[in-house]
Structures are given as structure tokens and as C-alpha cells.
Image: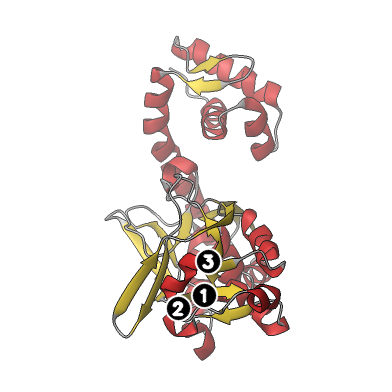
Amino acid sequence: MNIDLGELNAFITVARANGFREGARLSGGSASALSDAIRRLETRLGVRLFNRTTRNVSLTEAGSSLLERLAPALGEVENALDVVNGYRDRPAGTLRLNIPVSAARLALREIIPAFLARYPDILLEVITEESFVDLMAAGCDAGIRYDERLEQDMIALPIGPRKQRFAAAAAPSYLAQHPTPQHPKDLLNHACIRGRFASGAMFPWEFEKDGETVEVAVNGPFIMRPGGGTDLAVDVAKAGIGIMYLFEGWLQPYFNDGSLVPILQDWWPSFPGPKLYYPGRRLVPSPLRAFIDFVRAWPVSPAAREL
């Protein structure tokens, strides 16, 4: 059987994008070209790889089996071709990172511009994703996450602040009308701006002091989901609607300008900063290797170590 890598790449693109239009947008091609490539591949294989309706495109059982085997194999092909980059004067190629919005804001705002200035031949694509994903299946080279369980073949490297804290805050207008909480349990009598995970579970409000840990099941008039809703939640808090609980680094600019006031500071819990993680049992592509070396050499100020 003659193998057409273009058709196989088209298959992976559509499968990962869950559709031809989105696949075309992500790949910079056209939906009709992807559709034609998939049709040729299905004819060549003699099986249907996608179920198509006017509203949905989904993998068949045969398509799912092919994707499971094909994605790692094509990844190895890309790695083999990347070896050629070792003969260039400077690294080139595409680097895909899967990161949460919080890491993009708190850990990468200075690193990414400096990295791109150092390596102009590298195309960096960032995918924001709050849930833990299979990097290989998502087509990413590396990810950034907080203290989560990683697979055994993953390598983790600290990036950004080495230590962070969750902070509670409210607007001066809110505190002018309500007593300032002195203990985390006082939050039960306050309007709170809550968060919900993609899974549907509510984000816990945890506090700690002198070895004592307190988790409070707060209530309030506004619920946000991670991502773009976070800035809106800050605006809601600044308007005096309620108390919020978020990364200290995210709230610090509002503490500085006085639009939000820190509360319960003695109870703010600290946790390890984010980590860059990537598969350890495969050849590291040159763009990722350049990024790893850049992160390792990036200076971390004493203040950033304790954020």
C-alpha cells in the first residue's frame, strides 16, 4: 500500500479539531482540501474513518483505532526530520504548548517575548486548556500545569514563580457595607464570587494558618469558569458585589491601585509554582529543546521565588 503522508496528516488534523472547518482554520488550509484528502484515504483503506452529518464529524471505531496508533508514529517521523535542524545555525520549527490561562498570565508574560526574540525561526503556538490532557493526542510538545500527577515518563521543570499563594480580596465599597472577615468561617456570612471547574465541581476555598487548615463552602451571586471569565470576576469584585479568591499574583495590580483590598492575609495558603512538563521517552524536538534550555537559564528573582 502506498503511504501518503499528506493524507495521514489531514486525517490527524480533522480528528484533533473534530471537524473540517476547524481543522482548516488550525492548519491554515481549506476544508475542501482536507475533505478530499480524507476521502482519498478512506478509499485507499476501504473503510470509513469519520461519521459525517451536517452538524457533526466524529471518528468511527476504525478511525479511533487508526488515530491511536498513527499519532505517536507521525510524531516520531517529525522527530526524525527534526534531527536535520541540528545542522542549522539556530533552531527552527513549531513548538506547541498546552497551558492554563493562569500560567500564561503569571509565568509566561516575560519569558515568551524574550524567547521569541532569541529564536525568530521558531513558531510558538499556545493552546489554553484548564484540564489535564494527553499531550501526544492533543498534538502538543509540552504543557504547563501545577502540582498534578504526571505519567511516569513525563519530565517536569519549574517555570515562573517557585511558590505562589491564593488570596482573598474585596472592594473598599463592599467592606464599607460589611464587616471585614477575621476568620475564614466568617465568609459563610458574606457574598462570595465563586469558581467552577470544567468538570462541574466548585473550586474550593482553602485557608491555612499555624498548621490549621480550613475549607469553606462559600455562597454568592456570581460563578465563573476558568479562562476568560476570570477577568470578569475581578470586575464584579471591584464593583463591590462580593469577596473573591484567586492567585495573589493575579490580584496584586488591583491591590496596588486600591481597587481591591486584601483580607485574611494570615490565612492565605501557599503552593508550588507551575511546571513545564514533557514526555521523557522520546527524542526532544529542537524547538522544545531550545525552550527547555531557555527556561532553565531564565533568572528567577527572590521575589518571584516567594510569590
Q: Find disc 2 in the rendering and name its residue.
A: 268
State the image quarter where residue 77 is shown: top left
Front-most of residues 202 and 162:
202
The amino acid at mark 1 is: Ala
Residue density around tag 1, few if under 14, some if 14–19, many if 20 or more, within 10 Å: many
Element type at marker 3?
helix
220 up-or-down from 137: above or below: below
Q: What numbered label is drawn on residue 291? A: 3
Q: Residue 169: percent from the left, percent from the top?
A: 58, 74
Disc 2 versus disc 3: distance between alpha carbons?
32 Å
Answer yes or no: do the residues labelled 2 and 3 have beta carbons within 8 Å? Answer: no
Alpha-carbon span between mark 3 and mark 1: 31 Å
Mark 2: which amino acid?
A: Trp
Question: Which of the two discs, 2 and 1, labels the residue nearer the N terminus?
Answer: 1
Q: Residues within 10 Å of mark 3 (few under 14, many from 20)?
A: many
Q: Which residue is mark 1?
A: 167
Residue 288: horizontal and vertical position, in percent? 50, 60
Mark 2 touching mark 1, by CB under 8 A? Answer: yes
Q: How many marks?
A: 3
